[in-house]
Amino acid sequence: MEELFIRLNIKPKDINLYKTAFSHSSYANEHKAKNDYERLEFLGDAVLDLVVADYLYNNHKDSE
């Protein structure tokens, strides 16, 4: 993962957040990991829903 950060010029504040984001629930279950990405996925979906709803509401006022 460090090589990817270097190539993309990313300086993470919390490496554990990235590890969680890339941990599938089946991997976490098999390796007794505390976290998987599903919680972050839920948050990301909620943020995306908010952004799309705001855009549609403000840019398509004539559509009802």
Image (cartoon, rainbow, N blue to C red):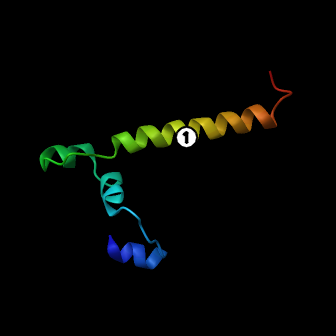
Q: Residue 54: x and y, percent?
A: 70, 36
Where is residue 8 drawn, in percent x and y? 47, 74
Q: Quadrant of the N terminus?
A: bottom left
Task: Give the total of numbered labels.
Answer: 1
Farthest residue, direction right: 62
Residue at far top of view: 64
Depth check: 64 or 37 in front? 37
Relative image position of residue 32 (x, y in whole percent): 13, 47
11 on left or right of 54: left
Q: Which residue is at 39% across, 73% downward?
A: 4
Q: Is residue 8 left or right of residue 22?
A: right
Position above or below: 43 against 21: above
Question: For residue 58, which quarter of the picture?
Answer: top right
Q: Residue at x 20, y 45 (%)?
A: 34
Question: Which residue in the rendered view is the most extreme toward the front?
Answer: 13
Give SS at disc 1: helix
Label 1 Cα neighbours within 10 Å, binned few <14 / some 14-19 / many ≥20 = few
Place of residue 22 in the rendered image (x, y in percent of width and height, measured from the top left): 33, 55
Quarter holding the C terminus is top right
Q: Report the amino acid beneath label 1.
A: Val
Residue at the disc numbered 1: 47
Residue at the spot 42% in from the left edge and 37% down from the top edge: 42
